[in-house]
Every structure is written in structure tokens, then in C-alpha cells.
Image (tube, helix red, strand yellow):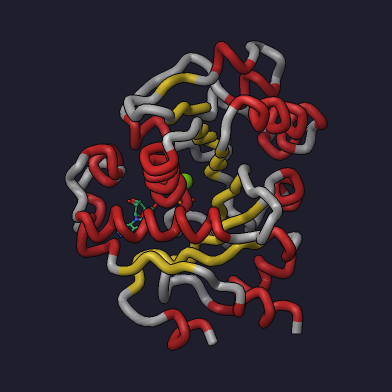
Amino acid sequence: MVIKRVIERVKEKVENLQDAFKKDVIPPVEKALLSGNVQTIITEQYRLLRSRLSGLNGNHASNVFAVTSTRKGEGKSLTSVNLAIVMAEDTKKKVLLIDGDMRKPSIHTFFNCKSEYGLVDILSNKVDIETAVIHSKIKNLSLLLAGGPVESPSDLVATALFKEIIEKLRKRFDYIIIDSPPIIPFADMNIIGDIVDGILLVVRAERTPKDMVIEALKSLNKENVLGVVLNDSKKRLSKFYY
Ligand SMILES: Nc1ncnc2c1ncn2[C@@H]1O[C@H](COP(=O)(O)OP(=O)(O)OP(=O)(O)O)[C@@H](O)[C@H]1O
Ligand SMILES: [Mg+2]
């Protein structure tokens, strides 16, 4: 069965993050690895995820990743941020983190930064890439925030310009991570999934029903799903997802 095959391709899990973050009393900026507040074990888990990613897809170079989840609130943004940070630090290559969740942008909160422009503004032809991409405090890590509010983000994602922009950015950066919208209830991931080299599906352990994960996986281009990041897990993946 196709879906079973996809689930068998689970490559990584990030365990016990909960212990480090002590729920939501901690502001996002402190949950990002840049604060230096999180335990080394967490950093190590993201490092492992990063190194597994570079080993995936055989000879085919994977440079552009979308981080998504079946529905909202499963840890897409947190995973994108921390993955981008370890990627920039470990590989010393140029990394770009894009806030592609235009309905619910949050990357700026992790980095405690502001920018007048972002992805929305490039997509609506207001500014060029150079104006919208900003540096983060982390060496080698640049950010493209979501930008101005937009009524219909799906329409922007569906334009040829979106693909064009990603192709242009691909030439300027070694790795690109897109914090993406959830798969349900939008169609955006169908488009984003075809543009990127690989999709990471974040699953909030024991919160996301297995059927929902299967439905979500069915709607994606399965060849592109690199693996599942099991977020906030205390148990082994197999107990819940098989
Ligand atoms: N492993 C974890 N342990 C504790 N809290 C977590 C963990 N992962 C995520 N959270 C918290 O859950 C909330 C949602 O996380 P995050 O914003 O990364 O998810 P998201 O999938 O991007 O959500 P949205 O769909 O709303 O954009 C945040 O408050 C985050 O700090
Ligand atoms: Mg988010």
C-alpha cells in the first residue's frame, strides 16, 4: 500500500522537546536554539535531523525543503527555525529561512526581528528579493519573512512567480527551508510540494490522529516526502503510528 510505504520512510524523530521548553510560558525567541538556553540534547537532535537530511535522496541534491504538518500547531515553525540554525552553523553554507505561512507568520517572533517587506511583497511585485531578504543574527542565516498581510495567500502561492522566486533564491543560497502552511485545510502544499526538493512532515506526537496523517500524506507528492519529524514525543513512534 502506497501510504504504508511512505510511513516506512520515516527517517527521524525529535524526542522530548517538551522537557526543554516547559510549555508556552517561554517566548518563541527562547525556544529557538539561538538563545543558547536550550539543552544540548535538543541541539543534538536537530543536528541529527540535519545530517540525516543531507544523506537522503541518494545522489540527487536536496537543497530546498518545505516543513509542513497535517494541521496547525504541530511545531512546523519551531522545527523550521531550529533546523535552519543548525544548518547554518554546521555546514557554514548560506541558508535561507522563508516564512511561507502567510496566514500565520511567526518566524519574526523567534528571531525577534522586523522587516518592512517579505514574501508577500515580492509576490505582489512591490519589492525585489534583495530588498526583502534580511540577515539574521546568526552567521550564514538569512531570513525572508512573510511580509504584509494578504487576503488570499493561496492565490499568491499559485502564481508562476512563486516558483520563479524560489528558483532565483536557489541560485543564491545553498539551502532553503520554507516554514509552510499546514496541509489541511489548504491546497497550498500541493503547489509548494512540487516546487521544493523535499518535504518534512512534522507530527505532534500523540495529538495528530493517524488517519489524518495518512489523509495528508495521500494528498502530497509522496516522492517528495523525505520523512516525518515526530515532535514532542515521549513514546516510540511505532506505538502510536502503526
Ligand atoms: N516539542 C515541543 N514542546 C513544547 N512545545 C512545543 C513543541 N513544539 C511546539 N511547541 C509549541 O507549540 C506551539 C506551536 O508550535 P509552532 O508554532 O512551531 O507550530 P506550527 O505548526 O508552526 O503552528 P501554526 O500552524 O500555528 O503555525 C508553540 O507555542 C510552540 O512553542
Ligand atoms: Mg507556524
The one nearer the camera, 110 or 167, is 167
Question: Total marks drawn?
Answer: 0
At 42% from the left edge and 51% from the top edge, which residue is drawn? 79
The one nearer the camera, 150 or 198, is 198
Q: Is residue 222 visible?
A: yes
At 65% from the left edge and 13% from the top edge, which residue is drawn? 128
Residue 159 horizontal side relative to residue 183, left or right: right
Residue 234 horizontal side relative to residue 237, left or right: left
Q: Where is residue 138 in the image (x, y as percent from the top left)?
A: 34, 29
> Residue most toward the front?
59
Query: Hey, which quadrant is residue 49 in on the image?
Result: bottom left
Quadrant into which the C terminus falls: bottom right
At 43% from the left edge and 48% from the top edge, which residue is drawn? 83
At 57% from the left edge and 45% from the top edge, which residue is drawn? 180
Q: Where is residue 176 in the image (x, y as percent from the top left)?
A: 57, 38
- Note whether 208 is above or below 23 in the view shown: below
Residue 8 horizontal side relative to residue 140, left or right: right
Q: Where is residue 5 in the image (x, y as percent from the top left)?
A: 68, 79
> Residue most toward the right?
160
Quadrant into which the N terminus falls: bottom right
Q: Where is residue 84 in the image (x, y as percent from the top left)?
A: 44, 42
Q: Can residue 81 be seen in this view?
A: no
- Note whether 188 is above or below 175 in the view shown: below
The one nearer the camera, 178 or 156, is 178
The one nearer the camera, 76 or 60, is 60
